[in-house]
Amino acid sequence: MSKLFQTMKVDLELKGYSPKTVEAYLRYSKQFLNHYQKPIEQLHTDEIRNYLHYLIVIKKCSHSYVNVNYSALKFLYKNTLNQEWNIDKIPRMKKEKKLPVVLSKSEVKSILNAATNLKHKTILTTVYSAGLRISEVRNLTITDIDSKNMQIRVRQAKGKKDRYTLLSQNNLSLLREYWKEYKPEYWLFPGVPNTKAISARTIQAFFKNYLNKTTISKNATVHTLRHCFATHLLEAGVDIFHIQKLLGHASPKTTARYIHLTHKDIIDLKSPFDMMDSDKND
């Protein structure tokens, strides 16, 4: 690793970025330099603008991909190179406001029922019943399950924050059944070797396998189960504030998007088109 990127790596770690983010920022910064094949000293605002434009127009990269590149280059120039970053000349792409895929309760149940492997079933059930991210479920340890208070402790989640979320009675029963059979020693869901936590890729793979065994045509992922947790709680009448705390969202605005996914407030409303017949009598 060059001296520049070694310095950038240290800067990122001093700021407390996660290993995953450190790796991504370094990779995207290297790709930027490789694109131009010039020393960093010769690359300035115009080159950054043109590169981001190239990712958008020529490479047809997603909004999220372009914005991660933007963040990586901004960190490289502002923090590591100590140079000014002109946000007027280098604008960030607007975030796409897409609603996440959500499954009905019966669809979630069909996926969980398709999971014939006890360990897989327990992992997916825990994700759904507690509203966990894939990184959170894979990093659970045995001591994070608090059956006395019916809570699951989520340690150092996104934003390096600890929180507690729900431990359902049915999930606890499944976890006990799983523990009796597998007897994990430290990680609740160990991988191979068992000194490591199960990988996110493994969880994604078996989820896709079980999804394909159902009749569900939606483009669901493991993270969809977390969206379902929030949406189904909202439909059950739980207020946004409590859902926000359970999910670990920093802002209620992030949680509020689930309002658009629930039929709770609109299911009994009628379209004006359906009211036309009654208006004929007026």
Image: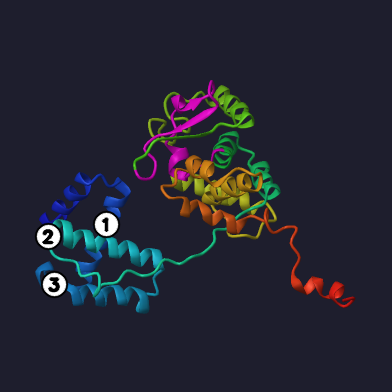
Q: Nearer the viewer, residue 21 or 184?
A: 21
Q: Nearer the viewer, residue 73 or 160?
A: 160
Position of 251 compared to 213: left or right?
left
Q: How many marks?
A: 3
Q: Nearer the viewer, residue 29 or 239?
A: 239
> Label 3 belongs to which residue?
38
Looking at the rendered structure, the secondary structure element under dot 2 is: loop
Image point (60%, 43%), residue name: 238
Q: Nearer the viewer, mark 3 or mark 1?
A: 1
Residue 195 % position (x, y)? 38, 30
Specify the quadrant that holds the C terminus: bottom right
> Label 1 belongs to which residue?
25
Residue 147 % position (x, y)? 54, 23
Q: Seen from this angle, which residue lies furthest front?
A: 282
Disc 3 marks a residue whose amino acid type is Lys
> Label 2 belongs to which residue?
82
Mark closest to the chain's N terminus, 3 or 2: 3
197 in the magenta segment:
no
Image point (69%, 59%), residue name: 266
Q: Residue 262 sits in which quadrant?
A: bottom right
The segment highlighted magenta reads 130-159
Looking at the rendered structure, the secondary structure element under dot 1 is: helix
Q: Residue 24 sits in which quadrant?
A: bottom left
Disc 2 marks a residue whose amino acid type is Asn
